[in-house]
Amino acid sequence: MDIVIQNELPSAAEREAVDAVLGPPGTSWEGSLQASERDRRVARGGHAARARRHLLLPTLHALQARVGWISRGALNYVCRRLTIPPAEAYGVASFYALFSLDPQPPVVAHVCTDVACICRGSQQLVAELERTVGPEGAHPGNGQAVWHESPCLGMCEHAPAAMLTVAGEDPREASVGNVTAQDIAGMLAGGAPPPAPAPLVPQQGDPSLRLLKRVGVVDPDSIDSYRAHDGWQALRAAVEMGPDWVLREVSASRLMGRGGAAFPTGRKWEAVARNAKRPHYLICNADESEPGTFKDRVILENDPFFIVEAMAIAGIATGCERGYLYLRGEYPLCWDRLVNAITVARSRGFLGQDILGQGIAFDIELRKGAGAYICGEETALFNSIEGYRGEPRNKPPFPVDEGLFDKPTVINNVETLVNVPGILMEGGLRYAEIGTEGSTGTRLFCLSGRVERPGIYEAPFGITLREVLELAGGVKDGRPLRTIMLGGAAGRFVTPDELDVEMSFEATRRAGVSMGSGVVMVVDDTVDLPAILMRLAAFFRDESCGQCVPCRVGTVRQEEALARLVDGRPRGSVEQEYALLGEITQSMRDASICGLGQTAADAIESALRKLDVFETGGRR
Ligand SMILES: Cc1cc2nc3c(=O)[nH]c(=O)nc-3n(C[C@H](O)[C@H](O)[C@H](O)COP(=O)(O)O)c2cc1C
Ligand code: SF4
Ligand code: FES
């Protein structure tokens, strides 16, 4: 698309979609079709325009949902409304995979071809789709529908998975699990998607569950059901006892962040609470785009009031009056349930200006990502909310000093936050007795791939990987285990003789592996391992934000070298390709700005080192 777009006009539907988010334009300066008295006096700009920039992403979402793509005229209108230079708005819109800047049919099926789905037949599914419906990107039938391959949709326990989006006056979105080529063909022909699959919590009913205890038990749309299952007790205690008490208990619990970096939550909360700069912001990071990860989705879909209560406690403790919940764009059911939970909680006095009648203010705003893994990185997430490209910032300054809108910000993962109500109810010191010395509490594990009982599992830190695998019934059909991808795409592969590694931050660090986001993706002897590695390489190449050279170029070179190995045509020998990959790995680790580039080679490097993938010089 040419970025000189001044002459293009929006359609009536596009205007409507933008105005539904921004309100009607006041003057011709903002694109109003009606001349107004204020035209001669008012031109929005400077500070006022910058203050509305954060509405860019929601406005682009509204256009995508209404029309199915973002035209030049529509983008032009957005630029006038928000006083954003067209090149910048184009840069933002083109950053996100879920936005299309080219004409696209209203019905789109996003078919997951990522690692857990490969283990569960997505390659065969795609081949059948190509045969029966047509190639990716083709418009079958009446041209009203299209299918695209997609990275992990966070539905790995129900693999193979897909997501349907239908644009229009009444836009619809749905996640589909255990999908077949016939299901997809039916949806592309205008049929309704199959119903959402029930949560897979094989431990349901186990009294030791702490984070999953209400999943599949409560009615996720009912605040009364939540209250009847211990809901709101911790928030009441926090309001009664005050912020210092909450901070003391959280610090005493030694709760470590579950988003990947394992940072002590109490330290983060204390730093923001004591920061004199105002306002403070809270962010719940629900971007969850790490391939193989679905734990946050299971909680948000099935126990949405839990995160509302946890965020309210965090906000009160750290002096935040506003919290943002940033949800990945591929979680439509979570979105609906969270909209309901936040609205109902506000109407019952658990959020708003006067929480529980005690004059305390805290409220939550939902924000939706648009298909960019990097937006889970905390500073990229700030940029995304603020209406900029989701590119990570340099650190320092750290978020506790300068985060969202350059203000002190607490950002935590969903799983981290939902530990807090339990900590307050039983006391931080008691909580710290669960797990290990350096890793207190329980951990959620996302079991997928060739495992007998895929789903989400909860166990105290200290359990071994072997025990986690046994909880899930072992390898599917009793086949031999080839490897486990532990921690996600940014994690590492482990071999069958490493299964006794203890699942704690300290033990995994010692063993040179990582629990990451709790991914345990099981690979047996039936899985096309080179295809998995190629998919990982493609994922990092696609998801690199491109802002620093080692990552932008390194992820491409890594994929090229791997492709040569998979094709059985190494440049020189296999050993020479391995040496080249080693150099690329080292450069990315040493010189990338953020964790994406620093870990983009970890899984592939560990597979090549431990699994003899290319011992025959090519694909098996
Ligand atoms: C590339 C990348 C992606 C990330 N994605 C997520 C994510 O989806 N969810 C998350 O909670 N943290 C993610 N993180 C970690 C966040 O930057 C941050 O450390 C985390 O949200 C802090 O919360 P915690 O202290 O509760 O773990 C990601 C980090 C990187 C480098
Ligand atoms: S390491 Fe990669 S994702 Fe991170 S800032 Fe650099 S280019 Fe972007
Ligand atoms: S949903 Fe397909 S890999 Fe996660």
Image (cartoon, rainbow, N blue to C red):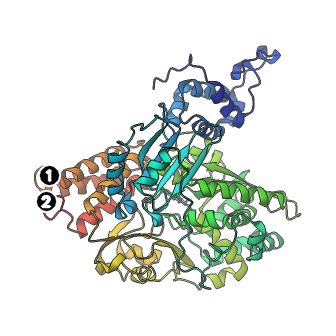
Is residue 164 at all visible to an observer of this figure?
yes
Amino acid at pointer 2: Gly
Specify the label residue 570 is tagged with: 1
Mark 1 sits near ligand 2, with its Cβ under 8 Å away: no
Q: Position of residue 400 (x, y in %)?
A: 62, 56
Nearer the N terminus, badge 2 or badge 1?
1
Q: Position of residue 421 (x, y in %)?
A: 69, 73
Amino acid at pointer 1: Pro
Mark 1 falls on what kind of element? loop
Mark 2 falls on what kind of element? loop
The crowd level at tag 1 (other Cα within 10 Å; few <14, some 14-19, many 20+) is some
Q: How many marks?
A: 2
Give the CA distance from mark 2 to mark 1: 8 Å
Dividing the picture into quarters, in which one does residue 146 lie? Answer: top left
Location of the C terminus (image quadrant): bottom left
Write down the residue under mark 2. Answer: 617
Residue 569 versus residue 243: which sits nearer the camera? Answer: 569
Position of residue 417 in the picture relative to residue 438 (left or right): right
195 in relation to 431, above or below: above
193 in relation to 36, above or below: below
Residue 499 versus residue 462: which sits nearer the camera? Answer: 499
- Tell me what residue is drawn at x 68 percent, y 57 percent: 338
